[in-house]
């Protein structure tokens, strides 16, 4: 998976801007300061899930994503917490139509904020080899929206790779 980037990418001997960990730096989980609504978040990912909860009947749960909150040390748990089954378990109802319309705009806004504030991220985005393929698990029936994967059967990319495309557009 050396042509993909994601939060747990291995450092390979192909540095960008002198950094072998450039794939992890491009991840939405990489630590950075994002500010929204007078709050600070430790990564794009945490701010994204906060925004998702703003489109539910329990927006207060989004405060769990604020820097210093319970998901700072385990951001993967934060992603799970905003998932379908966890939301149902917590009596949380997501406005799916609204989120479907707004989620890409939210992600673009968060990525732009990081790009403007984070010099290292900006250099990585500009210098990384193309195409930028954000790895995300999925299936042939349910292709990933923000990332992609390579089909074992055909070798072709499956998924929209929205996050990767967004980075390449900067």
Image (cartoon, rainbow, N blue to C red):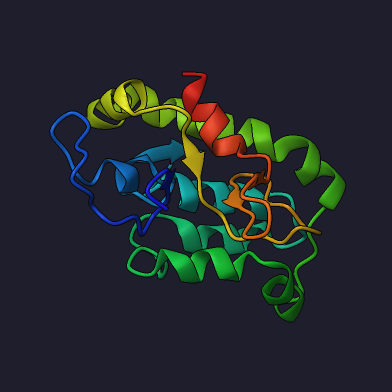
User: Which residue appears at 13% of the width and 33% of the height?
Assistant: 18
User: Which residue appears at 21% of the width and 39% of the height?
Assistant: 14
Is 12 displayed left or right of 149 in the figure?
left
Is 154 displayed left or right of 36 in the figure?
right
Residue 163 is situated, as x and y percent measured from the top left of the image, at 55, 37
Residue 112 is situated, as x and y percent measured from the top left of the image, at 46, 25
Image quarter of residue 115: top left
Viewer-proximal residue, 70 or 104? 104
Q: Is residue 112 above or below residue 154?
A: above
Viewer-proximal residue, 29 or 135? 135
Residue 40 is situated, as x and y percent measured from the top left of the image, at 39, 45
Q: Is residue 139 above or below residue 125?
A: below
User: Which residue appears at 23% of the width and 52% of the height?
Assistant: 11
Is 166 displayed left or right of 28 in the figure?
right
Q: How many marks?
A: 0
Q: Is residue 91 above or below residue 114?
A: below
Q: Is residue 38 above or below residue 95?
A: above
- Is residue 84 among the parts visible in the rendering? yes
Among all residues in the image, which is located at the extreme right? 97
- Is residue 32 among the parts visible in the rendering? no
User: Which residue appears at 76% of the width and 58% of the height?
Assistant: 140
């Amino acid at each position: 998976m050396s042509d993909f980037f994601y939060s747990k990418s291995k450092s390979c001997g192909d540095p960008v801007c002198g950094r072998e960990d450039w794939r992890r730096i491009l991840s939405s989980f990489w630590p950075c300061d994002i500010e929204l609504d007078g709050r600070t978040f430790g990564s794009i990912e945490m701010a994204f899930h906060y925004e998702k909860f703003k489109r539910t009947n329990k927006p207060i749960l989004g405060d769990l994503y604020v820097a210093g909150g319970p998901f700072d040390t385990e951001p993967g748990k934060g992603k799970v917490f905003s998932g379908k089954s966890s939301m149902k378990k917590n009596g949380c109802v997501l406005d799916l139509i609204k989120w479907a319309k707004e989620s890409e705009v939210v992600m673009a806004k968060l990525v732009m904020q990081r790009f403007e504030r984070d010099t290292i991220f900006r250099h990585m985005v500009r210098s990384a080899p193309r195409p930028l393929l954000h790895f995300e698990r999925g299936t042939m029936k349910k292709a990933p929206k923000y990332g992609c994967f390579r089909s074992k059967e055909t070798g072709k990319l499956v998924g929209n790779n929205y996050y990767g495309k967004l980075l390449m557009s900067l």
